[in-house]
């Protein structure tokens, strides 16, 4: 706190000497881990507009509702008709709703990193006991957690509804667990891709357009090529084409190892051997995304 000490002056003399020294901080030093947790918490809250203006809350909350409403409708139908199973498997729900997930990533990934770059606030983070790796881990984990909430909440609605409809507990629990594994992998992959694209430009609008383009165009191109391969009786090529889109990558992993029904043409997903390649490519993309983010911020001298 600045303390002012006026000096006795003669009449007419306006000279003053100000002591603007500051008191030293005597409290606890919480260190890097606390700073990283704080950045993670702040980024996660920001992904849903919490702590920001009302306008910033509209889109993420709307997309969250859009993700959950179809699940609630399915549950209501299953309960009313006393169905023996849910209309959509747990592992299929995120694939069906992939357009909403892509829109969420496109809107929130630039908000997480582009604003820091544009307004040059990143150096303020590094004025604290925090390093580049801490910053990248916090941002990556925050967006992945936000995506997991977005994709996991409707699965929880389906699971609770299935139990209320008195469907088989063991089957529903197994399906719910498989669905959570699938959306956790999807959240890591989409968060990494979204953050890398958003970190390339400090302009949020360009980041949104780029993320949408990468996720939607890649999916549309891959599904089109797979359909052409099926028409030309080249079914062996269908699983390999699926390696070139984030959505079809997750589809291939869960159909190979999580008992999901594939959305590939003909409903035939990759074999276990091909599924192992899908897993390696997915994990490689997640690791590569993290590495590219690290290089991006180190190269910027941050």
Image: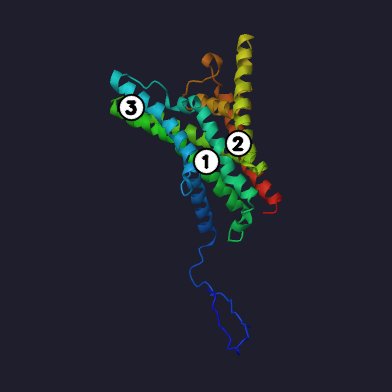
Q: Are marks 1 and 3 in contact (CB under 8 Å)?
A: no
At label 3, counting other C-alpha atoms closer than 10 Å, the crowd grade (few under 14, some 14-19, many 20 or more) is: many
Disc 3, SS = helix
Tell which circle, 3 or 2, labels the residue nearer the N-terminal end: 3
Residue 35: x and y, percent?
53, 57
Which one is nearer the viewer's eye here, 108 or 278? Answer: 108
Q: CA distance from mark 3 to mark 2?
A: 36 Å
Q: Which residue is mark 3?
A: 162
Q: Is residue 132 above or below residue 219?
A: below
Q: Are marks 1 and 2 in contact (CB under 8 Å)?
A: no
Question: How many numbered dots are placed on residues in this image?
Answer: 3
Q: Which residue is mark 1?
A: 144
Residue 132: x and y, percent?
63, 53
At label 1, counting other C-alpha atoms closer than 10 Å, the crowd grade (few under 14, some 14-19, many 20 or more) is: many
Tell which circle, 1 or 3, labels the residue nearer the N-terminal end: 1
Q: Which residue is mark 2?
A: 208
Disc 2, SS = helix
Write the residue at 53% across / 17% down: 268
Write the residue at 55% across / 49% down: 138
Tell which circle, 1 or 2, labels the residue nearer the N-terminal end: 1
Q: Nearer the viewer, mark 3 or mark 2?
A: 2
Q: Are marks 3 and 2 in contact (CB under 8 Å)?
A: no
């Amino acid at each position: 706190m600045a303390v002012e000490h006026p000096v006795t002056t003669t009449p007419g003399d306006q000279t003053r000497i100000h002591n603007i020294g500051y008191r030293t901080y005597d409290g606890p030093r919480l260190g890097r881990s606390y700073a990283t947790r704080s950045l993670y918490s702040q980024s996660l809250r920001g992904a849903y507009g919490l702590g920001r203006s009302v306008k910033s809350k509209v889109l993420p909350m709307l997309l969250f509702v859009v993700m959950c409403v179809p699940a609630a409708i399915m549950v209501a139908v299953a309960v009313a008709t006393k169905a023996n199973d849910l209309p959509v498997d747990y592992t299929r729900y995120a694939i069906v709703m992939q357009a909403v997930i892509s829109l969420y990533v496109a809107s929130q990934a630039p908000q997480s990193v582009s604003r820091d770059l544009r307004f040059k606030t990143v150096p303020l983070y590094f004025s604290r006991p925090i390093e580049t790796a801490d910053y990248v881990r916090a941002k990556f984990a925050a967006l992945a957690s936000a995506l997991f909430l977005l994709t996991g909440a409707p699965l929880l609605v389906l699971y609770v509804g299935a139990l209320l409809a008195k469907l088989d507990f063991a089957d529903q629990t197994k399906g719910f667990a498989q669905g959570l594994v699938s959306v956790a992998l999807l959240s890591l992959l989409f968060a990494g891709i979204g953050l890398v694209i958003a970190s390339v430009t400090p302009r949020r609008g360009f980041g949104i357009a780029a993320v949408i383009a990468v996720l939607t165009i890649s999916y549309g191109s891959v599904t089109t090529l797979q359909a052409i391969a099926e028409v030309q009786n080249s079914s062996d090529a269908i699983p390999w084409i699926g390696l070139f889109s984030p959505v079809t990558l997750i589809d291939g992993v869960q159909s190979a190892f999580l008992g999901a029904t594939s959305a590939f043409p003909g409903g035939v997903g990759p074999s276990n051997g091909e599924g192992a390649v899908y897993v390696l490519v997915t994990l490689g993309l997640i690791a590569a995304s993290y590495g590219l983010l690290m290089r991006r911020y180190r190269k910027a001298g941050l």
